[in-house]
Each structure stands twice: as structure tokens, then as C-alpha cells.
Amino acid sequence: MDNYNPANLLLLLVILFNFFLLGSSRLNACIRSVAIQGGILSLLPLFLHGFSGHSLILAGGAFLLKGLAIPFLLLRAIRQVHIRREMEPLLGYVPTLLLGTLATAGAFIFSDRLPLIEIHRGSLFIPVGLATLATGFLMLITRRKAITQALGYLIFENGVFIFGMLLAEAMPLMVEAGVLLDLLVAVFVMGIVMHQINREFSTMNTDQLSSLRE
Amino acid sequence: MLELFLHLFLLLALSPLLPGVIGKTKALFAGRTGPPFLQAYYDLWKLFGKGLVISRTTTWVFRAGPVLALAVPVLAALMVPFGAISAPLSFTGDLIFFVYLFGLGRFFTAAAALDTGSSFEGMGAAREVTFACLAEPTVFFSFIVLARLSGSLSLATMFGPALNAAWQSAGPSLILVVACLFVVVLVENCRIPFDDPNTHLELTMIHEVMVLDHSGPDFGMILYGAAMKLFVLGALVVRLVFPGATGNLLLDTLLFAGGMLLLAVVIGVVESTMARLRLLRVPQLLVGTMLLSFFSLILLLR
Amino acid sequence: MIAALLLLPCLGGLAAFCLPSDRFRPLLLPVCGLGHLVLTFLVIQGGQGTPLSLAGNWIAVDPLSRLILLIVSLLFCGCSFYAVGYLRYRIAWGNRIFVSCLLIFLAAMSLAAVARHLGLLWVAVEATTVASAPLIYYNRNRFSIEATWKYLILCSVGIALAMLGILFVAYAALAGGAQVSLQFDDILRGAASYSTPWLRAGFVFLLVGFGTKAGFAPLHTWKPDAYGEAPGVVGALLAGGLTSLAFLALLRTLQIMEAAGDGAVAREAFLAMGLVSLGFAAVFVIRQPDFKRLLAYSSVEHMGILAIGVAIGGVATFGAMLHLMNNALTKGVLFLSAGNIHRRFASKRVGEVQGAITLVPVSASLFLLGFLAITGSPPFAPFISEFTILRGIFNGGHYLTGGLFLFFLAVIFIGMGSTVLSVVFGTPTERKGDPDYRETMVTTGTPLVLLLIILFLGIYLPEPARKLFAEAADLLEVRP
């Protein structure tokens, strides 16, 4: 296992950020962490596929969108509503961290049993991808504020991106561009909806959004 | 034999220098001149010359606390390699003995605090013990990682020559272990961000309040013991970060001493740049560190 | 030709955004709708259509896409005329976002229908989610905000899972040693050699992902809220157009599994999902106090019927194709007339809405007839399609499935009936609602026309239409 391969080190950083996101309550720090995570991920195609035109454009585009544009939109959304901290999540920070660690450990163990092709065996991509998916999912279901649910969605998409990088031949540039643009517009719309949520309810706690029921 | 004397000499002579270096670093950050480097030595000299005041409500436990606080680090130091100088005392499983030695010392310090019957000490004892409880799994996971890498359960071998090869084969794991052990050093020695050693408000103290009632030589023993504990635990981190050996004993000793002073500077920097965490967040951070060390174990096991 | 089909709504959306006048902007809708319909007819009759090449066959028209395009286009055209009347009634709210998003929505749906590359399909479906969210929010109250947020998050996460599924399918190609490509024809050609565990994993994720968008139970939780709070026009388009499109994506998944030889597993999954959806719908339709949420559960029910039809195969697949069209158009009738009733009474709850037949006679009778149609009463077309599916079920010897199917349909008929009848008949309630609301030609014309189409199809299926359905069904049949 070539440990000092820069791709592997970056992937480990991604996992560290996952842990930080699960345990942090400061929204500014969370948004910036997702931004850095997105930035790290956007550099990975360069390490994996070399400096070809395709990967340069992909890396540049991903960096601009995931690292700069989307966090900018989210920061603007919370600046207007003056939120600083998340409330205690549904499970509590420590249980969420424990679940996240268990999921990460499970991802590492599980990915060793997957029928991967030779060059991917032993690499960190699959386990880190699975762990990031699990982290995003945990954030989506345990957090109360709309903004952290949106962050959970972004982390989930980061996990999917990690998988996508293994299959660069299958994902031509246009599609990647389309995916990133879609993400940008989705976050844009989410930001607007969050603003409206706050205007309507004077809070961004989504457990207020429970009046529609049978 | 030589290692034994070298260990004792380094421990007894060098450990009071560490609080001095930390103090000077903090003063530098604050723009002050700060206390001199040898301040701890002066304090110890002064304290051992003073008389003892003992409360009527205390028993022999109160006297036993400082004695153990002094004896435990000395014994523990004999099992830890100081840099490239190998440990004089080692046997299989001594890592468990190491951890629980400190547990013994902590037990008697807490018991001595409770013995005084004062509520402040009790409060501090409760907090201290909680934090130590949460930090213990971290230490064990880190030790397991090292044990697996070196193939032995003895501290001398774990931190011995196998470390170089370990860095080559499991670098990321070891980086995480270094970070976790550094956090443990901060917790066990009551440094910011877990405890403020300079606070004078009893409600915010954790360690200082436990030793509030000790005076004179007893307090001197506690101070000395604290400095030695910092030295011993710090030696683990320093050895992990500088795994090499030059072969020349003098050079190794100097390198090790330099590493310890560098560690003290780093602790000083951390203390100056961070604020103390809210009490509720400390368990969360400790659990997070434990999970991080668990994760480094997972990384190793793949 | 296809390019024009896609560009027309895009340009329309852009024009709607730039046009400053609230009065004239809604007129863009029928213009684009009619243009789109005309182009759709031309594309359908033009044989294979001209495949656009953006690095390989990315966009092309096959029988399934022809069917879906026709459904979407018909429904949109009808709804666009309705929308003119609706927006005139709501002129005080402004309609810039509404109109432009509607047109972008149409563009995205058309793109998804003709996409031959899985990545492009994904982008288009996600685009429909994002374009329809502001539409749900049009009423701008706390309920619609809640509905919009749930819709946005659930559907986006679902679509992200679908992306994971697509990547697994590509990995199946990689692991099987075949050429790795997400172009649909390449996949169909090479699927036989794909690695089975990865393909199945991909299928599961695609099923869950696109199933969330289609509204299968238990992934349907956003549906009652979204359909309940959105304006009637939007509800019609979502229930008729978007669900058909999501079902198309699922059909493409089925095609892949068939080509890989794993069709049996896929069909079983579809059958299970179909029965679960029917069950959920049956439970929640009973005593449903809100008649728009009722329609959402009806939508879940019909997605279940479609899934069962496709799973059984043979003549049931033909029935399912027919049912796609019938479901879409009937949902149009139901949602549009329900929207009218809602407006007249300013409430959606059954306790407050009664005796609609006296106050808004045309809409109420359309609602009633639509209810009869959707629950499968002759002489309307859904009866034919549901009967065909049932015939396929019993011919294949799946007696338990058939029994459950009939049981659930009966329960739903009773449950829906009690709500619909109490809304339509009875003495009008004390609550005045909006007495100035008048039914106009525009707001009742479309549901009437759609209902007449359904009636016509139920009595006589013209040959070109039958050929369209048959070709689409053949595409899904097992190739020996």
C-alpha cells in the first residue's frame, strides 16, 4: 500500500473532514469544511488520471463550483438569517459521531469484500466514497436545520463524485459539467427556499415543518 | 545501568524546565517577558523549605496523594524509551502497567482531594476523572496500533527501532496516532484547551483545585510530579515524531532533550492560540479523538 | 427537428423571464405548448427521427420516447391553456418565475424523454426537480414551503442515489471487461457480459432513486405534500408528466437488466414495488380529508399498477403502456377540476367543501367523471388498460397478484368515492369561499377536452395509437 501517494492522503483528509462535520455545531465552520472537502475532491482527478485536458477542465470546474460558488451561496443564505449554531441534533453529537465512525469502519471492511477490478483493490477510493455517502446520509437524517440538511446533501453528492472519479472514461465532460451545474442550481434554489423558510417561520428548524400530516 | 542513570538524570533534571519553556512561549505570544526559564526550579527549592499545614479533617490519604504523584512518573519513566535511549525496565504487557500506573496516581490525587471534604476539590476531582476516563480508550487504541506495527506488547519495543519501518509502511495511521497522543498529553496534564493552568477562579479549575489544599513540601512534590508526568507522556510523542537513532549516546540524548523542549514550545503555542473549551464540549472532543484513534486502527487493519 | 423540440421551450422560458409584462407573459405558454405539440407529432411520424450527435448517439427517439413525448406534450398543451386562465385569476401574485419555470420544466422533460445517454438522462431529471420546486412554492404560505423543502430534499437525494446506480452500472461494465460507456445502445449491446453483482446493485439504486421521483411507496412521502400544496396546473403536470418520465427512466433500467439476462429479478422487484404501492395507496385513501392529497395517493396507486403491468409482461405490458397515457390525461382532468373547486371554496378539506355541483357545476361534474375514470369504470380508457393488465395477470397464472390487485382497487374505489362524492354532492357549506370565482371557458375547457379524449380512447383505439403502444411494449419484451 503506497501510503504517501498524494491521492490517498487527500482521501484521508476527506474522512477527517467527515468526522469534523458530524461533530461540529458551528454552521460557518461546517460550510467551510464542505467547501474545503469539495476543493480537495476536485483535485483528485488530476492525481488519478494525470494532467490531461479532460481532467484539468473537470478539476477546475469542480473546484470553482464545489469549492467556491456553492459555499458562497450557502454562506449568503445564512448571513441573511443570522444563524450561528445548530441545535442539538436528533441523536446528539456523540452518538452521531459514533455512528459515523462505525459506518466508516464498516465501509473499510465491506469494500475489501467487494468484487473490484485489480487496479482498484486496496485503493482508498471505494471505502472513502462509501464513508462519505454514509456521513452525508447521517447528516441529512439527524440534523434539524434546513441548512445542515442541504450540507448533508452536498456531502452525499461528494461521495457520489468520488465513485464517479473511478469511471472517468464513462463520464464524458459534458455530463460532468451538467452534473455540476445541476448541483449549483439545486443549491441556489435550496438557498432561496431556506430564506423563505426563515422568513415564514423565523427559524430554520425543520421540525417546525411538520404541519402537513394525515 | 547507564540507561537507568541517564533516564533518572534526564527525568529529574530536565522535567522542571518544561513548564518554564511553556511559560516563556506564552509570554512571548502575549508580549510580556514572563517568568525566567528556571522558575520551576526556584519554586521547588522554595516549597521544599517551607513548613506543612495539614487540615484536621484529612487522613493518611491526603499525605499519600503527593507521594504517589511523585513516585508514579518516576516508575513510568523507566518503561519508556527516551528518544533512542532504550528503556531500562521492560516486560511484555508493560503498556497496560504504564497506563494504570497513571491511573493509580490519579486515583490517589482525586482521593486526597475528596479527603479534604471541600466541595471545590470534589468538583474538580469529578471533572478530572471524567476526562481521564474518556481519554483512556484513545491511549489504548494508539498503543494497539503501535503494538501491531512492532509486533510486541512492550513499550520498549513499540517505541524502539521498529518505528522507522513503521513510518514507511503505515504513515497515515501514525500521523493520526501522533495527533491523538498529543491530545492525550494535553488532557492528562491539564493544559488548554481542556483546563487552564493559570486560572485563579476555583469554579473554572479542574486540576489546580484538586491540589488547592496541599502546601509546602507536599505541593512541591505535586508540582514536581506534574512536570515529570508531562515529561514522560511527552517523551512518547517526541519518540514517535523523531523515530531515528544516531548510535552516539550523547547525540541521542541531546536530540531527545531538544525534542522535548520543542514539544514544550508547541504546547505553549497551542495554549496561546486556543481558548479553553466549554465544559460540555470537552467530552465530545475526547470522544472524537477516541474515534480518530479507532479509525487509525481500522486503517492499519485493511 | 428534435433540436427544435428542445430549444423551443428553452427559448420560451428565457423570453418569459425577460418579458416585463405580467398580463402578456402567460400567453407564451399556449404558444410554446402548441408549438411543442406540433413538433412532437412531426417527430413521432418522422420515423427514427434525426439523432443528434454530441460525441455519439446521445439523443435519439425510440418507441418509448415517442410515447412519453406525446403524453407530456399533450398534457402540457392542455395545461398551458388552463394556465392562462389561472394566471389571469392570480394576476396579483406575479408570474415571471412561474411561467419561465414551467417552460424550463417542459424543456427538461423533453430532454429526459429523448436522452440516450444515462448521464444526460440524469441531468435532465435533476433539472426537472429543480425547475418544479419553485412551481410548488407558488402559493407562498407555510404549507407550500414545507412541501417544497421536502420535495427538493427527498427528490434530490433520490436522484443522487440514482447517480450512484448509474455509476455501479458503469462499474459493472468495467468489472465485466466490456467497453465502459453510459450511452444506452452501447450498454444494451454489451450488457450480457456485465458483472452481475455490480449490475444488480446498480439496479437497486436506480430503482430506489428513480422510484423516489416516480413516487413508489415507501418512497412517496413527498407526494401528498407536494401535490396537495401545489397549484392545480402544477399538480397535473407533476402527476401526469413527471411521473411518466420517471417511469420511463425505470423502464430504461428494465431494458438494461433484460439485455443482461437478469430481467426476472428486475421484474420481481417491480412487482413487489407495485403491490406495496397499491397497498399504501389503499390504506391512505380511506378517510382522506384533503381532496388534493387524495389525488396524490391515487397517483401512487397508478404507479403501482404500471409497475405490476410491466412486471407481468406480455399483454400486460401493452396495457401498462396504454395506462401511461390514460393515467396522465385523467390526472390532468382531476387536478385541474380539483383546482377549480379549491379556488371556489378557498379550502381543500372535505369538511369545508361540499355541494360543489351546485356552485361550480362543470368542474364538479368533471371531477366526478374523472374519479370514475381513474378508478377504472367503463366506458373510460383506464378501464381498458387496467382490464388488459388484469388479463395478463390471470393469463400468466399469478392468481394471488390478481386477487390483491382487484382487492386494492376495490378499496381505493370505495375510499376515493366517499371523499369525492361528499365534495361534489350535498348542500353547499356555510363557508362562502370566493363567491366571485366564475368558471370560464379557459379553466374548464382543458379538463373537458382531456376527458373527452379519455372517453374516446375508451371506446375506440385508433390504429396509429395502437401501433405506438404496441411498439413501446415490444421494446420491453424479452428477446429470446
Image: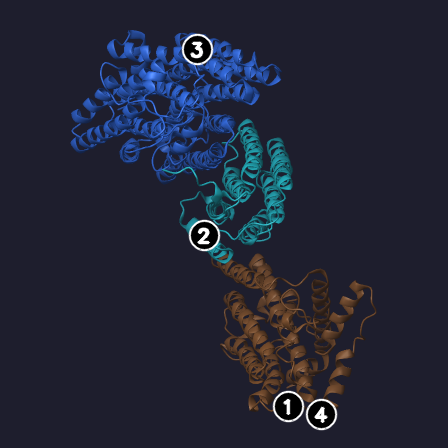
Chain colours: A cyan, B brown, C blue
Instruction: Give the alpha-carbon distance from disc 3 to disc 2, as whole Å.
Output: 56 Å
Task: Measure the C-alpha gap from mark 1 to mark 2.
Answer: 54 Å
Tag 3 near tag 2, CB within 8 Å = no
Percent of width and height locating residue C373: 28, 18
> Could you confirm whether marks 3 and 1 are on the same chain?
no
**Residue pointed to by mark 1:** B54
Disc 3 versus disc 1: nearer the observer:
3
Disc 4 to disc 3: CB gap under 8 Å: no
Q: Are marks 1 and 2 on the same chain?
A: no
Q: Which residue is mark 2?
A: A103
Report the residue marked by disc 4: B51
- Same subunit, labels 4 and 3: the answer reads no
Nearest to the eye among marks 4 and 2: give it.
4
C467 over A52 or under it: above or below: above
Q: Inspect the image, locate mark 2, and give the three-letter code of the amino acid beneath it.
A: Ala
Give the SS element for disc 2. helix
Give the residue number, with chain letter if any, for mark 3.
C442
Q: Look at discs 3 and 2 and give the one toward the viewer.
A: 3
